[in-house]
Image (tube, helix red, strand yellow):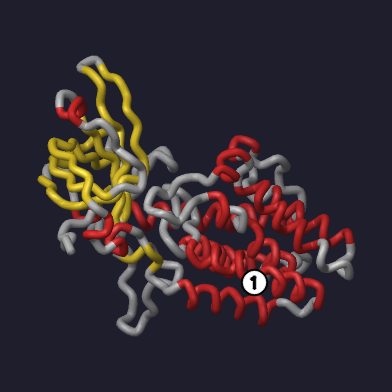
């Protein structure tokens, strides 16, 4: 078995690289000097863009998504992002490598994350129809299995196995902390809505090495997929008042916040605002933490396309030696 030695998170502009990587996306394009390949590479530490320029590109007939390739080249910087200019590209047999080296995974095991989600629901829900609804969805074998392996996104935030559970758990905690400040806020419906808000992502993105959108993900998207799942389980809880079911559906359908982010309806209740901003906050912080991983204090990240800016690692107030470290919803395991 071939041993992988270099990970993408270790690479910086100026480095030379010769190692194995997974291909998650590949497209042949045309430039002034000829055809080239635009590729996204991945290993368990993250992802990086790469290019095969002419004339080398002319000898590469195909770059299949999900393939493992031996890549040689140099790391450069393009628009503030590290990128590999590939000089040698050769496909290798996946059976000859350890696939665990190529899939980013949450630092917290999925079973532990799921147990924490269930514990929050157990302690936070007193209303019987809510407890029934959450129990039905979390004991469904297909959904439980999908939740345990789903990434939180394809590229932007929590883009690793277990990322969806990490994100869900963090948003649950955020909504409860925010709702505690406002007496009218319904903390129980926020827990339920958070469980369902991104559940469609478990069926929107494949869990293979290619991390590609499923047909349903491309044609319908996770909001509609999530609403279909929610409606299927709501039909099994007839004792839930229609007004509560309608509010829950509004929370899920409006959580993207603005039309430019794909929401069919903007938030229109206190709880909808809480869920939207909690969801957005966790996504932004996860993106920022991932970009700054390994950066020393007083340094900048590369430009983050999703944020439209670079982010800064500041000097922070020293903590007492006994202070707690990062919470469970940490970045992917390298």
Which residue bears the numbered disc 1? 138
In the displayed structure image, the side of residue 174 where residue 66 appears, left or right: left
Picture coordinates of residue 229, whole percent (x, y)? 70, 57
> Between 118 and 303, which is closer to the camera in this rendering?
118
Query: In screen coordinates, is 75 left or right of 228?
Result: left
Q: Compare residues 295 and 197 and report the one nearer the observer.
A: 197
Q: Quadrant of the C terminus?
A: bottom left
Q: Does any portion of residue 137 appear in the rendered image? A: yes
Q: Secondary structure at mark 1?
A: helix
- Residue at image position (72%, 52%) is 228
Residue 283 x %, y %: 49, 54
The residue drawn where x is 78% and y is 65% is 184
Classify residue 322 by image quadrant: bottom left
Q: Sort mark 1 into few (<14), some (14-19) or many (20+) by Cα contacts within 10 Å.
A: some
Q: Is residue 223 left or right of residue 239?
A: left
Q: Residue at x 45, y 53 (%)?
A: 157
| Position of residue 323 measured from the top left corner of the image (x, y, whole percent) | 37, 80
- The residue at 76%/48% (across/down) is 268
């Amino acid at each position: 078995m071939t041993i992988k030695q270099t990970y993408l998170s270790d690479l910086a502009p100026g480095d030379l690289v010769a190692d194995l990587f997974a291909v998650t996306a590949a497209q042949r394009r045309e430039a002034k000097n000829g055809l080239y390949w635009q590729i996204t590479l991945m290993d368990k530490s993250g992802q990086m863009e790469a290019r095969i320029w002419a004339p080398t590109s002319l000898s590469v007939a195909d770059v299949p998504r999900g393939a493992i390739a031996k890549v040689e080249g140099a790391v450069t910087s393009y628009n503030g992002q590290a990128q590999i200019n590939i000089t040698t590209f050769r496909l290798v047999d996946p059976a000859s490598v350890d696939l665990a080296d190529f899939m980013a995974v949450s630092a917290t095991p999925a079973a532990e994350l799921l147990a924490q989600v269930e514990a929050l629901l157990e302690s936070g829900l007193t209303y019987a129809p809510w407890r029934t609804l959450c129990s039905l969805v979390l004991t469904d074998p297909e959904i439980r299995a999908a939740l345990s392996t789903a990434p939180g996104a394809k590229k932007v935030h929590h883009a690793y196995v277990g990322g969806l559970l990490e994100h869900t758990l963090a948003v649950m905690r955020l909504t409860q902390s925010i709702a505690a400040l406002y007496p009218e806020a319904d903390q129980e419906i926020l827990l339920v809505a958070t469980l369902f808000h991104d559940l469609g992502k478990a069926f929107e993105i494949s869990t293979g090495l290619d991390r590609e959108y499923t047909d349903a993900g491309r044609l319908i998207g996770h909001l509609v997929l999530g609403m279909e799942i929610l409606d299927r389980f709501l039909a099994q809880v007839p004792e839930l008042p229609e007004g509560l079911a309608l509010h829950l559906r509004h929370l899920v359908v409006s959580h993207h916040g603005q039309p430019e982010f794909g929401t069919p309806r903007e938030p229109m209740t206190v709880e909808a605002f809480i869920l939207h901003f909690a969801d957005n906050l966790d996504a932004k912080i996860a993106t920022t933490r991932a970009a700054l991983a390994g950066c020393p204090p007083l340094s900048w990240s590369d430009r983050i396309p999703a944020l439209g800016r670079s982010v800064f690692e500041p000097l922070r107030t020293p903590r007492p030696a006994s202070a707690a470290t990062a919470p469970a919803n940490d970045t992917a395991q390298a």
